[in-house]
Amino acid sequence: MEHVKKPTPKKQPPSISVRFRNSAVRKMLRQVSELEGISQRELIEEAVSTDLTLRGARLASDLELAASRLRALSASAYRKVVDRSIEEFAEAEGLPEPIRARATHSSPEFALVGGIDSSLVKALAAFESDLKSQVSEGEDDPVSEAASPLDSSIDLQSAHSLGRSTSSPRV
């Protein structure tokens, strides 16, 4: 048995159903199509095409007008923002700084020694030196012999236990 190729049916253009809510429009459509000598479908298609062209032109005009207004407003708004920023900057220049500047020191006297601020070590050394001078001058020892710092040099571990260890210099 041979396969006979059937002719493919001609595709119909997409269609939509139109239901008129107003019976007078349906009646006028029928009358105009008869007077023009065209089908109602053709009249509807021409009317819709014309209407869409007019509406599209009106929308394009409206959009161009809106874009023009936005450009003008944007330029005006931009100028206002720049002017306001300049005024605010000038006013702020007369105000005190919100964050106070602090000096940072990189000299050796502010360096950390074994994780301890060297200024604490120097203070302990000065205290020990003062105590030694008092004892050598024959003054009464203000501290008992057991607790005297004269018995040992400055102990970094003791300084750390005083809670004076800092990671940044004090100003």
Image (cartoon, rainbow, N blue to C red):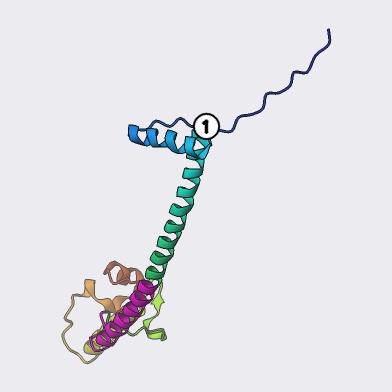
Residue 82 painted magenta: yes
Q: Quadrant of the C terminus?
A: bottom left
Amino acid type, residue under disc 1 in the picture: Ser
Find disc 1 in the rendering and name its residue: 15
In the image, residue 69 lies at what x, y percent? 37, 69
Magenta stretch bounds = 72-98
In the image, residue 83 lies at what x, y percent? 32, 83
Nearest to the observer: residue 1 or residue 139: 1
Nearest to the observer: residue 122 or residue 12: 12
* Residue 75 vertical placement versus 52 (above, below): below
Q: Quadrant of residue 79?
A: bottom left
* Residue lying at the far right of the rendered structure: 2
Residue 37 painted magenta: no
* Residue lying at the far top of the rendered structure: 1
* Residue 158 vertical placement versus 46 (above, below): below
Q: Secondary structure at mark 1?
A: loop
Q: Quadrant of residue 106?
A: bottom left
Q: Examine the residues drawn in magenta and state their main secondary structure.
A: helix
